Amino acid sequence: MTTTIRGLMGACCVAAFGLPAMAETITVATVNNGDMIRMQGMMAEFNEKYPDIQVNWVTLEENVLRQRVTTDIATKGGQYDVLTIGNYEVPIWAAQDWLLPLDNMGDDYDTADFLAPVAQALTVDGTLYAAPFYAESAMVMYRTDLLEKAGLTMPENPDWDFITEAAEKMTDKANGIYGICLRGKAGWGENMAFLTAMSNTMGARWFDADWKPQFDSPEWKATLDTYLNLMTNYGPPGASSNGFNENLALFQTGKCGMWMDATVAASFVTNPEDSVVAESVGFAPFPTMAGGENHGNWLWSWNLAVPASSTKADAAKTFVAWATSKEYTNLVAEKDGISNAPPGTRTSLYENAEYLKSSFAEPTLQAIERADTQSPSVQEVPYTGGQFVSIPEFQAIGTAVGQVFSAALAGTSSAEQALTAAQTLTTREMTRAGYPK
């Protein structure tokens, strides 16, 4: 989907005889998630404050966005002035001098208000290279009414055995209700975000200390077997095509008993204007394996950054400062209610008494604070990252492995075949890239 808001096009120029400057148009590439769509609805307020800056929106599905902005910035194409990117890309791209530093963002911007784990992931050598628009970890979202009907109580720390039992008992296919919804769409930030987090809870790892891929390990087999069992028996049809947005729609329309995904979804599934199950949603930590302690807490943020290739850096930076400011949070609160403010970025939001009344505020903050991106697996690993591996090669490798696992979910291969293929292709690509380095 592409939404365009056009003002006067072209670079800012000053006409003769003292006429005012023409509006400068910046192009913002962003993902088609709910909070970003809401931001586009706030443009009247932005234009009132900054009439000399017009915004052209390019709004894309997550996988497409990643592909296009990566190509543009690597080739210095200059197609976009503001990029929506994740904390995976920021340190890698900053090291390549592909991003402009975000310093001097204004006297009232207050970068010290950012949650420490989020800000640290966007900072290189003491300099902020992207500003967080929202941040998330992962948790269980579940139907309290269906769980009660099944005669079960959600544990304080659920494990995969309980999740499997609950999924079975909540499934009512005759009435279009599926016990569990999980990501199946291929992509390093789609199904592999979930499966990497899940594998961490199972004691698995992508690579050992010598960068040897580990898909031939019993921990990865346990991960994929559990995932395929859940989705094949208790998941919705066509799950191999479902990503975050598709599962959100399923949950909001009452089709899912449980959904393990990003904490940012909480405000949408509890909003009675969008969700038919808003009054019957509970939250719990992301599951562990039986007896385990690793909840696979990922840490992700969608951030706004200015590429070094932009010729309108000042206007782009002005927009970034506005969209990630306390002022913007207050604007959302005024128009749509404080519970719809972009979550996970500012300490002040989690000190707001009204926001803390939301059932998801504390679970979200706890999940983010408990994320251990430095040691994501219980085993020793040579990388950092929660639901991703923080090396440049992961984007391509993660997507390729995601396609293999999505095919297994679609029934075109077995778990064993998928794991063998993942091991082979990852070994080949890591060898080609020169690992171990």
Image: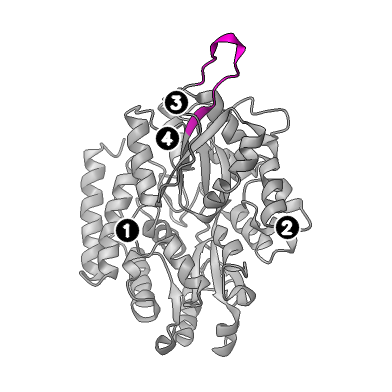
Residue type highlighted by circle 3: Ser
Q: Are marks 1 and 3 in contact (CB under 8 Å)?
A: no
Q: Is residue 372 visible?
A: no
Q: Residue furthest top?
A: 17
Q: Is residue 15 left or right of residue 32?
A: right
- Label 1 vs 3, first from the N-terminus: 1
Provide the residue designation for mark 2. Answer: 355
Q: Which residues are magenta?
A: 12-26
User: Quadrant where the C terminus lies?
Assistant: top left
Q: Amino acid at mark 4?
A: Ile
Q: Nearer the viewer, residue 388 or 187?
A: 187
Front position among marks 2 and 4:
2
Percent position (x, y) of residue 253? 50, 74
Residue 273 lies left or right of residue 239; in this view the side is right
Residue 273 occupies quadrant: bottom right
Q: State the residue position of label 4.
A: 92
Give the vertical position of 60 relative to 75 (above or below).
Answer: below
N-terminal-most mark, 2 or 1: 1
The amino acid pointed to by label 1 is Ala
CA–CA distance in space, label 2 to label 3: 36 Å
Number of residues whose C-alpha sits closer than 10 Å to that of mark 4, classed few (under 14), some (14–19) or many (20 or more): some
Q: How much space separates mark 1 and mark 4, taking CA atoms? A: 23 Å
Q: CA distance from mark 1 to mark 3?
A: 31 Å
Residue at horizontal 39%, vertical 76%? 235
Along the line of sight, the residue nearer the viewer: 340 or 170: 340
Q: Say whether marks 3 and 4 touch (CB < 8 Å).
A: no
> Mark 3 = which residue?
310
Tell me where residue 65 sits by quadrant.
Answer: top left
Query: Label 1 belongs to which residue?
Result: 186
Q: Amino acid at mark 2?
A: Tyr
